[in-house]
Amino acid sequence: MSGPQVKICGVKDIDTALAAARAGADFLGFVFFRKSPRFILPEKAEEVILDLKEASFEEGFALPKLVGLFVDAGEKELSEAPTLLTHFQFHGHESPERCKELGDEFAVEIIKALPVSVADDVLKAGAFEGATDIILFDAKPPPGAGRPGGHGVSFDWTAISSYTGETPFMLAGGLSPDNVADAVASQKDHSGFLGVDVSSGVETAPGNKSADLIASFISAAKGSK
Ligand SMILES: O=C(O)c1ccccc1NCC(=O)[C@H](O)[C@H](O)COP(=O)(O)O
C-alpha cells in the first residue's frame, strides 16, 4: 500500500480548506445536506474552491480532490453543485445503477457510503462493484439520528476483513488524531484500503473545524506523528 489518503469532511470556509490542503489532505468534503451542522451552500462552496485553487497555484501545494456529499439528491440539487467537484459522495438510498448513471452524467467519480455496525453490513458493498469508484465504510448512525453521518461514533474495524471487492475503500466513523494511526494499522494489509475520512474528530464543536486538529490528524494518519 502507498501511504493512506486522507479526507477531511465538512469544510465550510476557506481557512479550513487552506489548513487541510496545506497539511496534505487528499480529499476535501463539502456537505450539501441542509440538516447538517456542516452544511454549506453550493455558491459558498464554489467560492471556497476557487480561492483554494488560486492559493494552490500561488503557494504550490497540491489541490485536493473535491467531494460533494449528498443524501438522496435529485437532478436539480446535483446540477446546482459546484462544477469543480471531482467526486459525489452518496449517503442515502442510491442504488448501484443510480450511482453509475449519475457518475456518467455529471462526469465525476462516485463514493458510496455504506453504514456498518457488523460484518454482514460490509457484504452490501458487493452490489456496488463496477458502479462506484470508492466505497466508504462509515459507522452506522445512532438510532433516531437526523443525518446519516458525522456522529463521531466508530465501529469494529475488523468487520472490514470480510470485504473482498475490487473497489477501493475508505474507513470513517469516530476517527481522531488519537486513534487514526491504529485505524490505518488495522487496514494496511488489506489490498483495497485507500485511506481514512474524518469530520467530528477534527472539530472543537459540531461544524467548527480546528486547523491544529486537522494537521495532527493528517500527520498521524500518514505516519509522521
Ligand atoms: O457530517 C455530516 O454532518 C454529514 C451529513 C450528512 C451526510 C453525511 C455526513 N457526513 C459524512 C462523512 O463523510 C463523515 O466524515 C463521516 O460520517 C465520519 O464522521 P465522523 O464520525 O464525525 O468523523
Image: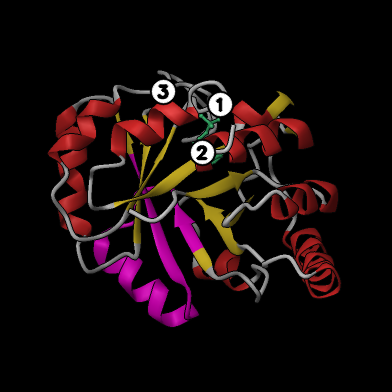
Queried whether the magenta region covers residue 44, the answer comes back as: no
Residue 112 location, quadrant? bottom left
Residue type for callout 2 = Gly
Q: How crowded is mark 3: few (under 14 residues within 10 Å), some or many (20 or more)?
A: some
Mark 1 vs mark 3: which is more N-terminal? 3
Residue at 31% in and 64% down: 132
Tell me if I can see residue 210 in this picture: no
The residue at which mark 3 appears reads as 154
Queried whether the magenta region covers residue 89, the answer comes back as: yes
Residue at 65% in and 74% down: 84
Residue type for callout 1 = Ser
Q: In this view, does 35 lie above or below 79?
A: above
Tell me if I can see residue 143 in this picture: yes
Helix, strand or loop under label 1 = loop
Q: Is residue 164 above or below residue 133?
A: above
Find out if the beta carbon at label 1 lies less than 8 Å from the nearest ligand 1 atom: yes
